[in-house]
Image (cartoon, rainbow, N blue to C red):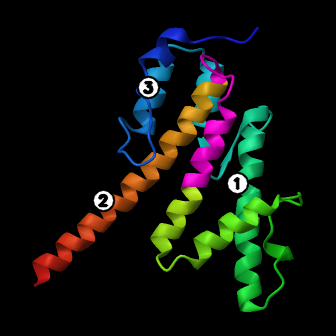
Amino acid sequence: MPNLYYYLIASLPMLHFALKPPFSFKEFLQRCQESIPEKDVEVLEGLTLEGSRAKERPIIRDWLSFDAMLRNELVKLRASRKKIDPTKYLRLDAYASPSFYHIALAAQRNPSPLEGEKILDIERWNFLEGLSFGHHFDLDFLIIYAYKLLILERWERINSAQESALLEEALKR
């Protein structure tokens, strides 16, 4: 029987892709340390958008596989544009559905690199939404929440960097 964390999860605010994160990933971990066992906190501490130390959890393997297949499609598109062999840059040898190609193509063809990244992160977010089905108060819910929070933090850094650059440019004038 998995551990269920009703109080902690019920106290977490909902996350929305286009909004600022309600708190940092570090603050999220602090909240978790107060309410869940240390072994589960260690799983959460090991999460990054690029990987995880706890790859034995099916939900983490699913996330890593999805992200690797999406990145592989980007590699294939970029390699074909540069007319080089992509095989040495591919991460996993797994079948990617045709939808991955279309997502990568839409991101690459977007005239704005920033908007292209947004397309990719929206697809990542939607994948996490799909993974969350059936996980309401367990560790897998917290893992999905953590990945979403990491995505939001990434966009917060991107947006604040843009604001800083715009401010510096305006001050130079």
Amino acid beneath label 3: Gln
Q: Residues within 10 Å of mark 1 (few under 14, many from 20)?
A: many
State the image coordinates of residue 152 (x, y, percent, origin top left).
45, 47
Quote the CA–CA distance across marks 2 and 1: 25 Å
Viewer-nearest of discs 1 and 3: 1
Q: Is mark 3 on a helix, strand or loop?
A: helix
Question: Marks 3 and 2: in contact by CB < 8 Å?
Answer: no
User: Of marks 2 and 3, which one's residue comes earlier in the chain?
Assistant: 3
| Residues drawn in magenta | 122-139
Taking the magenta stretch, the answer to whether it contains residue 128 is: yes
Write down the residue under mark 3. Answer: 30
Name the quarter where the N terminus is drawn.
Answer: top right
Q: Quadrant of the C terminus?
A: bottom left
The residue that mark 1 highlights is 67
Farthest residue, direction bottom: 83
Which label's residue is closer to the chain start, 2 or 1? 1
Q: Which amino acid is tagged 2?
A: Ser
Prevalent SS, magenta region: helix
Q: Is residue 96 left or right of residue 163?
A: right
Mark sitting on residue 76: none
